[in-house]
Each structure stands twice: as structure tokens, then as C-alpha cells.
Image (cartoon, grey):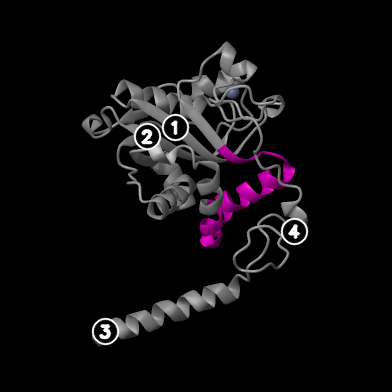
């Protein structure tokens, strides 16, 4: 039987509805039922530490200071300038936001994609005007196969569509498989990702501003290594946008 467009549409919508029925929309942190357009229930929302106030110009972490000028830096960035130029995040990493990101990362529930994109859109609004191209921090193909997708790619692509800035996951490539960064010290993290990334078609990023997307910014070891590879290949500026970042005390 020839499958017409109509039949295909019917099959797809039935499947989509069945999936929605199987997964009622719930709070990403605690599984309480919530309205479709939300991501957290009111209780969890009140526990999410959104990043606001005076921020470090580079890493985007909150400064407990009154703004004197727009280029104020935190002690860490003053001490050692990151290789990326600016990083911004929607919220800080705490037990509530951690559970929400882990769930998004590990369960394959992509029905939260839209809400995460809205959070990134808000957090990264100062970066988009100068951005030429969006790309995700790449996963090695082995991890991508085992997980089925790259969550940074999923939200990066959706963000690109929303803000109309081109997206690619074909330029920055993870050239070798690296063990997970979690539970590693700062030094071990840097060693772990050293030379793990390469750039294909460098002419496509020459003198361009790249916006890197990832889920969490911790010590910055991974994004700094990516930024190093991108800049070596000719990128002028590298921005980083993540769903969350750790505060310094909880880095390790
Ligand atoms: Zn909740
Ligand atoms: Zn900083």
C-alpha cells in the first residue's frame, strides 16, 4: 500500500498524542503534574537560584558587589583569564537545579526542550547580537550512540531556530573519547580534555564569533579547551551559554 502524506500525518499525530498520554507533563525536578508551558512546579521554582544581579563580565558568576562598571571581574577571572570571552548561565547549580539537569540529560524527555530554550534565550540575550554561529560542546560519537543524542546539541539547535542564528555540529569535533568529568579535580579535568577537540573546516569560523552551548559550566576546563581549539583555528571570539553554572565553592 502506498503511504500517502495524509496517512503518514495521521500515524505521526497519533504517535505524538500517545506519547503525550504516556508522559503527562510534570515538574522536571519533582514529577508533580504541572501546566504544559511550565518546567518547574511553584515549589521547585522558588528553590532555583536564577543568575541575576551584578555578574562577572567573563564567567557570568554573581558578584556580591554593586555595579561600578560593566566589565567587573570575579577574583578567579582576575587571577586567570579564561580562554573563552564571556560565559552566561540561566541558574546556579544546587540540589534542585542539579536534579532537573540530570533528568533532562539522562531520560531522553525532550518535551522540556522549549522551556530550556526560553531560559537560555533570557540568560544569553547580551551575547546574541555579536554571535555569528552556534555550536554545541560535542560528545564523542561513542557517548552519543549510547545516550542517543547530545543534549547540548538539542537545545543549541532549537535556540538557533528561535533566535535565527546559524547552528552547526559539524565544525567542532571531539577527536577522542574522554572519561566523564564528574568527580574529577580541577587539574584532572584539564588533563582529561587536553587536545580532545578539533576543528574541521576552519575557514567557516575565521574571524567569527562562536557561541558554545553546554548544560553546565563547572571549572570551565571543557569549554576553555573548546575555545582554545576554535581560536587556534581562527575564531575571533568564543561565548559560552549554559543552563547552569556551579558557584566557585562547589567547583570540585
Ligand atoms: Zn517540582
Ligand atoms: Zn569570573
Earlier-in-chain disc, 4 versus 3: 3
Q: Residue at x 25, y 30 (%)?
A: 202
Part of the protein shown in magenta:
89-116
Mark 4 is surrounded, within 10 Å at the Cα level, by few (under 14), some (14 to 19) or many (20 or more) other residues, namely few
Earlier-in-chain disc, 2 versus 3: 3
Give the image quarter of residue 205: top left
Q: Nearer the viewer, residue 70 or 228?
A: 70
Query: Which residue in the structure is indicated by mark 2?
Result: 210
Q: Quadrant of the N terminus?
A: bottom left
Give above or below for 115 relative to 17.
Answer: above
Q: Are marks 2 and 1 in contact (CB under 8 Å)?
A: yes
Point out the frontmost of discs 4 and 3: 4
The label on residue 42 is 4
Q: Residue at x 44, y 32 (%)?
A: 239
Q: Quadrant of ligand 1?
A: bottom right
Assess whether residue 202 is covered by the magenta stretch: no
Amino acid at each position: 500500500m502506498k503511504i500517502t502524506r495524509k496517512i503518514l500525518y495521521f500515524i505521526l499525530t497519533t504517535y505524538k498524542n500517545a506519547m503525550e498520554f504516556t508522559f503527562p507533563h510534570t515538574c522536571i525536578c519533582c514529577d508533580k503534574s504541572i501546566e504544559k508551558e511550565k518546567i518547574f512546579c511553584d515549589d521547585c521554582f522558588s528553590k532555583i537560584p536564577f543568575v541575576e544581579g551584578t555578574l562577572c563580565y567573563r564567567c557570568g558568576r554573581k558578584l556580591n558587589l554593586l555595579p561600578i562598571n560593566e566589565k567587573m571581574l570575579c577574583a578567579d577571572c582576575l587571577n586567570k583569564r579564561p580562554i573563552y570571552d564571556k560565559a552566561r548561565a540561566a541558574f546556579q547549580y544546587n540540589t534542585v537545579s542539579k536534579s532537573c539537569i540530570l533528568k533532562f540529560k539522562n531520560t531522553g524527555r525532550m518535551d522540556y526542550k522549549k522551556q530550556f530554550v526560553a531560559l537560555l534565550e533570557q540568560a544569553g540575550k547580551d551575547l546574541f547580537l555579536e554571535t555569528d554561529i552556534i555550536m554545541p560542546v560535542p560528545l564523542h560519537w561513542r557517548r552519543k550512540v549510547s545516550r542517543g543524542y547530545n543534549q547540548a546539541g538539542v537545545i543549541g539547535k532549537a535556540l538557533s531556530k528561535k533566535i535565527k542564528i546559524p547552528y552547526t555540529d559539524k565544525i567542532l569535533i571531539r577527536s577522542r573519547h574522554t572519561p566523564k568529568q564528574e568527580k574529577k579535580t580541577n587539574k584532572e579535568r584539564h588533563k582529561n580534555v587536553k587536545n580532545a577537540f578539533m576543528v574541521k573546516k576552519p575557514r567557516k569560523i575565521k574571524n567569527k564569533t562562536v557561541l558554545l552551548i553546554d548544560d553546565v559550566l563547572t571549572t570551565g576546563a571543557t569549554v576553555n579547551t573548546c575555545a582554545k581549539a576554535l581560536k587556534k583555528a581562527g575564531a575571533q571570539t568564543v561565548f559560552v551559554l549554559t543552563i547552569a553554572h556551579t558557584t566557585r565553592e562547589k567547583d570540585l
